[in-house]
Image (tube, helix red, strand yellow):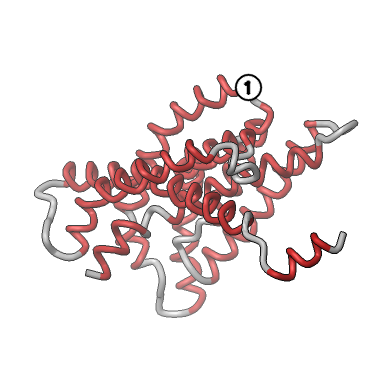
């Protein structure tokens, strides 16, 4: 039961949430760099520079500890799509549509390679283990593409200031929660049932399709979690404790 719940509501749903917040953060970084008198080109250079450092840390993490690192994935995105923060909304959505198809395919491929990655964790010696894990770096560009859809949506959300102005977008956020969670849960069922041994794909194609649906609907789950965070923050932000009330009254 616990495994079913985790697969339905957490696995493959928390990662898109991170991607959404990463994209949102890129917009805020751009606003700071390209404020009054600022140059958007400086923001793009900063994003690429930080993306390069993410790749460096990601590669080190893969070689030294874990072949399934995701830090480098966001570094690859930052290098390739740094200009996305200054695109028009029309271009942003057009590129999002293209990357969604390729991103889901990339995420599906990574999921299908997960079992192989597990065998890359340990070798006869520490040096052998590092070499085995380093071989997983070949999929880093694919991993960067797999996070692109969520990050691009996060960039759009940052432009709209969804997290900064939740009261303004309350009805939109509520709809995202009411639609996003069911879509994510339903899309996870083939993989969730497989995880608890209640279903098994009868072909490689069926397994790949299940992973593709799981990856695509994971973005809906990430959006639902982000909307929930915004609504909860707005709710508690409107409450005033006795100390706050006393300070306001004493002004």
**Residue 138 visible, this angle:** no
Q: Quadrant of residue 44?
A: top right
136 and 1: which one is in front? 1
Residue most extreme to the right: 37
Q: Is residue 162 left or right of residue 10?
A: right
Q: Residue furthest top?
A: 90
Q: Does 143 sit left or right of 157 as displayed?
A: left
Quadrant including the C terminus: bottom right
Rendering coords of residue 142 (x, y %): 45, 43
Q: Which residue is mark 1?
A: 88
| Residue 174, position as x, y percentages in the image | 44, 42
In this image, 46 relative to 97: left or right?
right
The residue drawn where x is 59% and y is 23% is 89
Query: Height in image: 25 above or below 153?
Result: below
Which is more toward the observer, 130 or 89? 89
Q: Residues within 10 Å of mark 1 (few under 14, many from 20)?
A: few
Residue 163's x, y, as percent?
60, 45
The correct choice, above or below, for 170 with respect to 8 in the image is above
Which residue appears at 64% of the width and 25% of the height?
Answer: 87
Q: Residue furthest front?
A: 249
Camera-side residue of 190 and 8: 8
Total numbered labels placed on residues in the image: 1
Is residue 240 visible to the viewer in this orientation of the structure?
Answer: yes
* Location of residue 131 in the rendering, given as x and y in whole percent from the top left corner: 48, 66
Dot 1: element: loop
Residue, x 78% and y 31% (percent of image)? Answer: 40
* Relative height, residue 54 to residue 128 (above, below): above
Which residue is outermost to the bottom?
125
In which quadrant is the N terminus drawn?
A: bottom left
Q: Residue at horizontal 64%, vertical 40%? A: 79
Residue 180 placement: quadrant: top left
Q: Nearer the viewer, residue 205 or 21?
A: 21
């Amino acid at each position: 039961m616990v495994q079913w719940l985790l697969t339905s509501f957490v696995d493959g749903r928390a990662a898109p949430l991170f991607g959404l917040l990463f994209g949102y953060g890129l917009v805020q970084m751009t606003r700071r760099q390209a404020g009054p008198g600022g140059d958007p080109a400086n923001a793009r250079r900063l994003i690429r520079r930080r993306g390069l450092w993410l790749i460096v840390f990601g590669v080190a993490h893969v070689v030294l500890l874990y072949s399934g690192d995701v830090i480098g994935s966001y570094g690859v995105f930052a290098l390739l799509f740094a200009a996305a923060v200054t695109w028009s909304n029309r271009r942003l959505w057009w590129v999002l549509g293209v990357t969604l198809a390729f991103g889901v395919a990339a995420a599906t491929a990574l999921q299908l390679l997960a079992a192989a990655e597990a065998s890359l964790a340990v070798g006869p010696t520490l040096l052998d283990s590092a070499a085995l894990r380093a071989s997983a770096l070949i999929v880093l560009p694919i991993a960067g593409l797999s996070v692109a859809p969520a990050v691009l949506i996060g960039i759009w959300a940052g432009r709209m200031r969804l997290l900064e102005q939740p009261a303004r977008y309350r009805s939109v956020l509520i709809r995202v929660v009411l639609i996003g969670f069911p879509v994510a849960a339903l899309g996870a069922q083939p993989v969730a049932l497989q995880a608890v041994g209640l279903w098994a794909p009868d072909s490689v194609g069926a397994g790949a399709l299940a992973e593709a649906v799981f990856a695509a609907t994971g973005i809906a789950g990430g959006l639902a979690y982000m909307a929930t965070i915004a609504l909860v923050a707005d709710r508690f932000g409107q409450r005033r404790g006795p100390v706050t009330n006393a300070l306001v009254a004493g002004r």
